[in-house]
Amino acid sequence: MKKIAIKKGQILQRAGELKTKVYKVESGLLRSYTIDTKGKEHVYQFAPENWIIADAVPATSSGELFIDCLEDAVVIELPKDFETLFQNAEKVARRFEVFQQRIIMLMSATASERYASFLETYPNIVQRVPQKMIASYLGITPEALSRIRKQKPKN
């Protein structure tokens, strides 16, 4: 385990890299995402303070996600092994819960319902993340997100 300072815009992991790590965010904001064959980014996760972010592939496989820094941050870099993960079992369990809810929402919820869920999951980052990234996370266009936000009371 080592603590590292990361500057805004720095990429911690690129898709295709081996020996991916697990990162526990102490301060700042990270995100993970993929880039499709057309060059479009698809946000998979945001990781604000006290969240864990990682690529789910085994440490011996090539990573599928990019992980970058949206704000200057301090993270603890953890090796990707079961012993380390079990030391952070509560955070890992919370991560799985969020992903399960997200998958269910993407399959069956309206865009407005997905946005409401986003606000519940990430209550403190809506002003810290560009609207186009939130739209990507929700699987909608920035214009659709703008319409939804106009219907919702400001948080």
Image (cartoon, grey):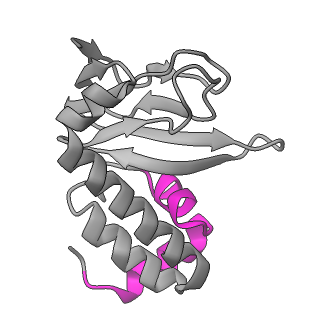
Q: Which residue is painted at 30% across and 38% down in the image?
A: 29
Principal secondary structure, stretch drawn in magenta: helix
Report the label total. 0
Q: Which residue is painted at 53% across and 63% down in the image?
A: 135
Evaluate whether residue 27 shows in this view: no
139 w.r.t. 6: above or below: below
Looking at the figure, which quarter contains the C terminus? Answer: bottom left
Q: Which residue is painted at 42% across and 22% down in the image?
A: 21
Q: Is residue 78 left or right of residue 100?
A: left
Provide the residue span drawn in magenta: 130-153
Question: For residue 28, what is the image quadrant?
Answer: top left
77 w.r.t. 52: above or below: above
Q: Which residue is painted at 26% across and 84% down in the image?
A: 153
Evaluate whether residue 47 shows in this view: yes
Give the percent coordinates (x, y) of residue 115: 41, 75
Give the percent coordinates (x, y) of residue 132: 53, 55
Give the percent coordinates (x, y) of residue 34: 63, 41
